[in-house]
Image: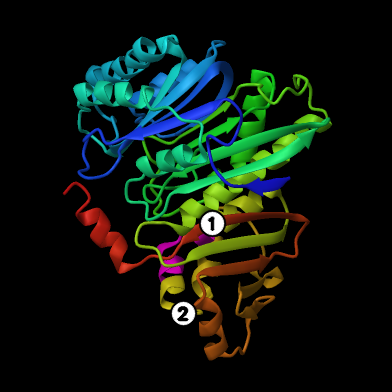
Amino acid sequence: MEIIKGGVTAAKGFFASSTAAGIKYVGRTDMAMIYSKEPCVSAGTFTSNVVKAACVQWDMEIVSSSKPMHAVVVNSGIANACTGKEGFDACKATAKAVEETLGVPYDSVAVASTGVIGMQLPVEKLVKGVKAMSGNLDESLAAGTESSKAIMTTDTINKEIAVTFEIKGKTVTLGGMAKGSGMIHPNMCTMLAFLTTDLAIEKSLLQEAVSEVVTDTFNMITVDGDTSTNDSLIAMANGQAGNDLITTKDESYHTFKEALFFVCEYLAKKMAGDGEGATKLFEAKVINAKTKEDARTLSRAIVASNLSKAAIYGCDANFGRFLCAMGYSGAQFDQNDVELFFESKAGKLQVFNMGTPMDFDEEYAVKIMKEQEVTILVDMHEGSEEATAWGCDLTYDYVKINADYRS
């Protein structure tokens, strides 16, 4: 596998565009479109929040059907959540506009929204935006990058990646873009993420690969403990790489799944590190746990704890906060089996050993914790399973951003 430049337009046959529709923001793009003339098989995972945005309900119907997908239209600024029938009508109007301008069925068009909950979308601006984007579709890498910028809300950086890999002599490309900075919690799948590939693969296998990979990537990040109403991951595969159709879980399938995991993990970590007001990526790695689920539960509990996140921000080696979070996580373990370490580019330091605190160098601990990426490594000594979760530190700016969000 090789990392290449680009995002959603890196794979053959995919086009993108963006526009400033004026939905909420002034002076920046706020709508994006991904398009494939060739029909795509699709897969998706969506929020577990019972309060689902209209766009999530729309997309769940499309992805679960046997019909092909041609396009995704995304807007930022307004979430189209808690908007009743009017919100669902806005989804249909957006998809109908794509049908009119590009000649593809409206039920082959997914829609996604991100932004303020409880506001109605300006349908006229959406339709106008679709028409503008339909006339400016471009397969350049730059077009994909601009689309990744258009879907940002409180994100400070755009998030995209692309890779190539070989399947039986054919070069296959997989690209993706995502947005996410706040209202992020690992209780479903992801925030907003879009994956495009020119791989030829059966729909059921694409869905299975996406669902499995999400478990240990997007489902292992948290910023603030809030699971959004709009969380959506949509993958599209148009088969333009020319490989033999993947119909079984053979070597080709596993090669693709490895690339998919890499792309999803990369985007997930970018979101965690770009949490609202964050200054650091906060990683918790649990090794030698009794079960995989215990490892996941323990690592997520560590990065989700507000006290842990505050300690990471303040460079306070208060290891008791991490052990405390593990203790109330629901996983059963013996604290007398546990070792705990602080780790970063600056070094590695053990602070807890088999139930007993270590006499460690506080200055060295601060040096380790001042790095932009800090890891809490926990060895359970109870099995062979492991898992990693990602989050960010909790800063004063998180409150400022969210106190003023609607304004």
Q: Amino acid at mark 1?
A: Trp
Q: Write the residue at 63% across / 46% down.
A: 4
Name the residue carrying label 1: 390
The mark that comes first in sequence, 1 or 2, is 2
Q: Is residue 314 visible from the viewing direction of this image?
A: yes
Classify residue 251 as left or right of residue 403.
right
Quarter of the image with the N terminus is top right
Give residue 310's position: percent from left, percent from top: 40, 70
Which of 21 and 355 lies nearest the eye of the viewer?
21
Q: Which is the main secondary structure of the residues drawn in magenta?
A: helix
Give residue 68's position: percent from left, percent from top: 55, 13
Q: Amino acid at mark 2?
A: Asp
Crowd around label 2: few <14 · some 14–19 · many ≥20 (10 Å): some
Q: Write the residue at 31% across / 21% down.
A: 131
* Magenta region: 302-310
Crowd around label 1: few <14 · some 14–19 · many ≥20 (10 Å): many
Badge 1 element: strand
Give residue 371's position: percent from left, percent from top: 52, 75
Badge 2 element: loop
